[in-house]
Image (spheres, rainbow, N blue to C red):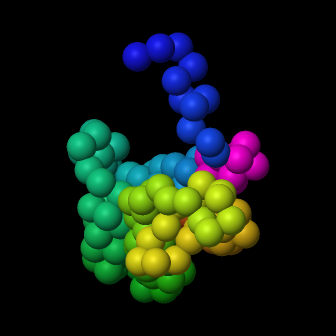
Amino acid sequence: MAKDDRLRVPLDPKYAEVLGLATYCFARLEWDAVYCCEGMQKNYLRSVRNKTAGQIADDFVRLVSALSDQQLKARCEAPANEFKRLVGARNALIHSNPATEPGGNQRLVRDGSFWTPELIDEAADEFTACSLLLNELHHGPLKSYP
């Protein structure tokens, strides 16, 4: 192992940038979900250390379905389900395999489809849109629940 070996990977810096930003956007989303779960179940934060995003999504959906406040439940259901869907999108991105496009660019590919910078940006936008909803719930009705 030599210092700067990572620079031997022929990856376009713009591609690395959008991939890194999407990863960060998902991390924010995931933690917004964790904090929403904490709002519904005290000390949830202590249980999250070894959980996958999928397990967190399952917990989130389960906790929302158990809410007794029907108005709050209705407000949380769609964002919780969206987070669960986006876990799948993140997994499709992060668990893709590196490959070379016909034009020579290095890209991630999943099921025969290349992740273009545009597709990665779209995923990052979806992650952020859901994150904003969850952040609003966390700092709003779930902050003082029950």
At 65% from the left and 59% from the top, the residue drawn is 104
At 29% from the left and 69% from the top, the residue drawn is 58
| Magenta-drawn stretch contains 13 | yes
Q: Is residue 85 left or right of residue 55?
A: right
Q: Position of residue 72 (x, y in %)?
A: 49, 77
At 40% from the left and 16% from the top, the residue drawn is 1
Callout count = 0
At 62% from the left and 42% from the top, the residue drawn is 10
Q: Where is residue 109 in the image (x, y as percent from the top left)?
A: 49, 67
Q: Where is residue 145 in the image (x, y as percent from the top left)?
A: 44, 61
Name the quarter where the C terminus is drawn: bottom left
Q: Main secondary structure of the magenta part?
A: helix
Q: Is residue 78 left or right of residue 18?
A: left
Q: From this view, report whether residue 81 is shown above or below residue 54.
A: below
Q: In this view, does 24 lie to the left or right of 68?
A: right
| Magenta-drawn stretch contains 48 | no
Residues 28 and 138: in front is 28
Q: Position of residue 82 (x, y in %)?
A: 49, 77
Q: Quadrant of residue 119?
A: bottom right
Q: From this view, report whether residue 34 is shown above or below residue 132.
A: above
Q: Which residues make up the magenta segment? A: 12-22
Residues 70 and 20: in front is 20
- The reply to whether residue 58 is in sight is yes
- The reply to whether residue 125 is in sight is no
Q: From this view, report whether residue 38 is shown above or below residue 50.
A: below
